[in-house]
């Protein structure tokens, strides 16, 4: 008989916090209902800003994610091992059950040689090669950040490195967790959902609906200005920033309610129009970021 898929109960709550999701996952691990899964986090063609954003996580901390819910096996910036020993950890993890997180796009020009992530037995290992071999074996693949999800800044015209997104590169399902950078809650919450419940509900672009289901515009604190036709004519003025180029109407994230940097603020609240950094057309299709 087919086992009914367990659905995360907090989908039905308006308060989807990464903390709640991770507590469910960690409780499952502690009561031996689930295994702590291995994690490979590759930094490909990008700025590593998603990892930095992740280290800024507060509720829960990145430490909690990496120790309590997953076993971080490989990451260029955070692991102790180096050289051949580091890459051997990567190879060993391929023989286990693991989640692959990729941040940054995949540079494909000249067989990927413009993004070397390791050297092993004297050979340069490209990000392209590492993503391909890990992508074939991973239980789940997450494209974290807009470069990994859609190409982003790394693939912006004229794209000299011939970068492509992870879903374009890998012939398999990839969960997109975009943002420039991605919010730490979007990453930890998605991984927690994978551990406790499997793949979350996704939209047509493969983004978890719990974080990317509603436009910024729909929950913006300046929405009443828009509805009443009150528009700011310059930065710093009260009013809707639509005429200054705000991309909130075409960008789906929960920034207005989740907020950033320890849940204290977000761009529109700080008088800056949304630049659509989590959107599939960022940055080329979102320019100019501010219209004067
Ligand atoms: S500031 Fe932007 S997101 Fe907010 S109401 Fe205006 S257009 Fe929509």
Image (cartoon, rainbow, N blue to C red):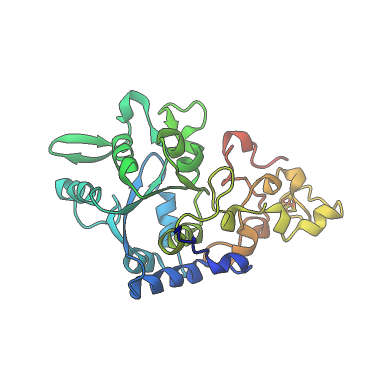
Q: Residue at x 15, y 46 (%)?
A: 84
| Residue 66 image position (x, y, % from top left) | 34, 63
The quarter of the picture where residue 106 lies is top left
| Residue 30 image position (x, y, % from top left) | 34, 74
In-front residue for pair 232/202: 202
Q: Residue furthest left?
A: 121
Q: Residue at x 40, y 61 (%)?
A: 195
78 shown above or below 173: below
Q: Residue furthest top?
A: 110
| Quarter of the picture holding the C terminus | top right
Q: Residue at x 43, y 64 (%)?
A: 196
132 with respect to 216 (left or right): left
Residue 45 visible in the snapshot? yes
47 shown above or below 31: above
49 shown above or below 292: below
| Residue 161 image position (x, y, % from top left) | 40, 28
Q: Please count the marks in the image.
A: 0
31 with respect to 15 (left or right): left
The quarter of the picture where residue 275 lies is top right
In-front residue for pair 174/166: 174
Q: Residue furthest front?
A: 1
| Quarter of the picture holding the N terminus | bottom left
In-front residue for pair 240/208: 208
Q: Residue at x 63, y 50 (%)?
A: 252
| Residue 23 image position (x, y, % from top left) | 44, 72
Residue 238 visible in the snapshot? no
């Amino acid at each position: 008989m087919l086992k009914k898929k367990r659905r995360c109960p907090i989908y039905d709550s308006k308060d989807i916090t990464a903390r709640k999701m991770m507590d469910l996952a960690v409780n499952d691990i502690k009561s031996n209902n689930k295994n702590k899964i291995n994690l490979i986090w590759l930094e490909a063609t990008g700025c590593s800003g998603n990892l930095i954003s992740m280290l800024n996580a507060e509720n829960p901390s990145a430490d909690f994610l990496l120790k309590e819910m997953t076993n971080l096996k490989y990451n260029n910036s955070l692991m102790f091992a180096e050289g051949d020993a580091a890459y051997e950890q990567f190879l060993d993890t391929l023989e286990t059950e693991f989640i692959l997180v990729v941040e940054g796009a995949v540079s494909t020009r000249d067989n990927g040689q413009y993004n070397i992530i390791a050297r092993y037995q004297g050979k340069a290992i490209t990000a392209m090669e590492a993503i391909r071999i890990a992508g074939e074996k991973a239980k789940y693949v997450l494209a974290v950040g807009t470069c990994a999800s859609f190409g982003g800044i790394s693939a912006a015209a004229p794209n000299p490195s011939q970068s492509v997104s992870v879903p374009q590169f890998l012939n398999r399902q990839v969960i997109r967790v975009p943002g420039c950078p991605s919010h730490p809650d979007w990453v930890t919450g998605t991984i927690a959902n994978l551990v406790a419940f499997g793949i979350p509900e996704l939209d047509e672009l493969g983004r978890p609906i719990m974080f990317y289901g509603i436009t910024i515009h729909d929950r913006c604190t300046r929405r009443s200005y828009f509805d009443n036709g009150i528009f700011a004519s310059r930065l710093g003025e009260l009013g809707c920033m639509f005429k200054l180029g705000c991309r909130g109407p075409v960008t789906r994230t929960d920034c207005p309610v989740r907020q950033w940097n320890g849940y204290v603020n977000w761009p529109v609240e700080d008088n800056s129009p949304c630049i659509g950094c989590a959107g599939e057309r960022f940055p080329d299709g979102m320019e100019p970021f501010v219209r004067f």
